[in-house]
Image (cartoon, rainbow, N blue to C red):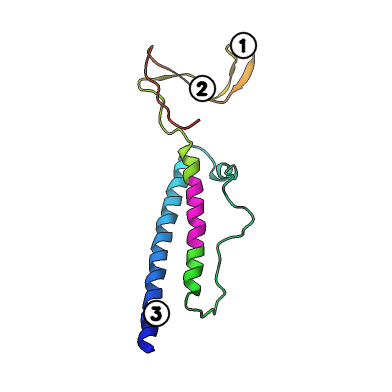
Amino acid sequence: IRVLENKLVNLEAQENSTVGRLTEQTEMFISNMEHLIQTAGLDVEDLMAGDDDLVAGQGGPFIELQGDERPAGRLKANLNNLESRLAYSESLQKVVRKMPFAPPMHGYYITSKYGKRRDPLNQKWSMHYGLEFGSTPRAPIYVTAPG
């Protein structure tokens, strides 16, 4: 029985170690994605608030009650935390895939910037929520994001 108990302890330690490494890698990926979004001048929380796939009202990750001596108690808690972080990671990826991170053409120039401007048709002050690009005639235009 002692041999089996030792094997079980070793197996649990290996499983917890593996889940720990996966969680660390997931956290690193999340950190990189959030940094990418922030570098683009956007707010991560605002973007994620619009993601309908995020489950709200579920609380934070499961934290095991201290003193729980069940063999799989810690592993289950670690797996629940990993599952939660993976779900957040997937939602971040979904948001980032929709963002244009490349110019739509080579050799372009900006003809109209984001912000306050005179409307080109009626000359009244208006807010322009985009960028307009110019280039040579028949220059290829590339899709930089879905939509």
Secondary structure of the residue carrying tag 3 is helix
Report, in whole angstroms, how far the alpha carbon at label 1 lies from the one at label 3.
Answer: 76 Å
Please state which of the two labelled residues, at mark 2 or mark 3, is closer to the viewer.
Answer: 3
Amino acid residing under circle 2: Lys
The residue under the point 57% across, 47% down is: 53
Label 3: which residue? 8
10 versus 130 height, above or below:
below
Q: Earlier in the sequence, mark 2 or mark 3?
A: 3
Q: In which quarter of the image is the N terminus?
A: bottom left
Disc 2 crowd, CA 10 A, few/some/many (<14, 14-19, 20+) = few
Q: Position of residue 2 (x, y in %)?
A: 38, 89
Mark 3: few/some/many CA within 10 Å (<14, 14-19, 20+)? some
Which region of the structure is painted magenta? Answer: 81-92
Q: How many labels does the image show?
A: 3
**Measured from the top left, where is residue 69 in percent x and y?**
51, 80
In percent of the image, x 36 and y 77: which residue is there?
A: 10
Element carrying mark 2: loop
Give the residue pinned by disc 1: 123
CA–CA distance between discs 2 and 3? 63 Å
Q: Which mark is residue 113?
A: 2
Reply above or below: 66 against 3.
Answer: above
